[in-house]
Image (cartoon, rainbow, N blue to C red):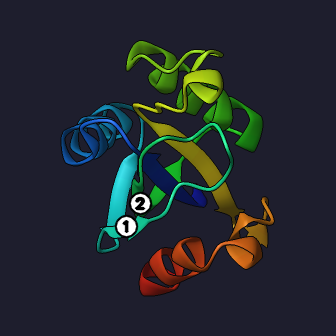
Amino acid sequence: MNTAIVILGSNVEADQNIDAAKERLSEYFEIDLCSSRIGSDAVGENYVAPFLNEAVKLYSDETAEETIAIFKQIETEMGRTPESKITGLVPIDIDLIFWNDNLMRNDYNRFSFVKRCVDEIK
């Protein structure tokens, strides 16, 4: 069993979309812990609204690549499109930060809100 820590982010109906994403994730994975939700300013010129973020610790029987593919599938099913970056409206973003204690994305060190959320459950 693999341990993953992911960060969920949304700037469109954020509370509802994060709840829906966690529900979808629970269909594939065992969710262990969730952080508190932290707001963050939009970073980048295209993003038009602030984000709400939450870290989730889950267990996966899949490989990291298969797990990420499931995240992308959930994002798409929830309305995430390639145009989301252009419009600046992101219904849900699911990023793998740690996989079995290995840092997978530099967002953990780059964004304080990611570090704060992740550190609550790490």
Do the CB atoms of the residues marked 2 and 1 lie less than 8 Å apart?
yes
Q: Position of residue 96 (x, y in %)?
A: 64, 52
Q: Residue at x 42, y 16 (%)?
A: 79
- Give the position of the N terminus as an image quadrant: bottom right
State the image coordinates of residue 4 (x, y, percent, origin top left). Answer: 58, 59
Q: Say left or right for 63 vs 77.
A: right
Left or right of 65 on screen, residue 33: left
Residue visible at 41% across and 42% down in the picture: 29
Mark earlier in primary sequence (2, 1): 1
Image vertical order of residue 111 relative to residue 2, above or below:
below
Residue 90 visible in image: yes
The three-letter code of the residue at mark 1 reads: Gly
Residue at (78, 69) in percent of width and height: 103
Q: Which residue is mark 1?
A: 39
Q: Find residue 60 and name its label.
A: none
Q: Residues within 10 Å of mark 1 (few under 14, many from 20)?
A: some
Residue 53 is tagged as: 2
Residue 73 higher or lower than 21, as above or below? above
Residue at 42% across / 54% down in the picture? 50
The image quarter containing residue 21 is top left
Q: Nearer the viewer, residue 106 or 50?
A: 50
Residue 40, picture quadrant: bottom left
Q: Amino acid at mark 2?
A: Asn
Q: Is residue 37 above or below residue 45?
A: below
Q: Position of residue 67 (x, y in %)?
A: 62, 36
**How many numbered tags mark residues here?**
2
Q: CA distance from mark 2 to mark 1?
A: 6 Å
Element on which disc 2 rests: strand
Callout 1: SS = strand
Mark 2 or mark 1, whichever is nearer to me: 1
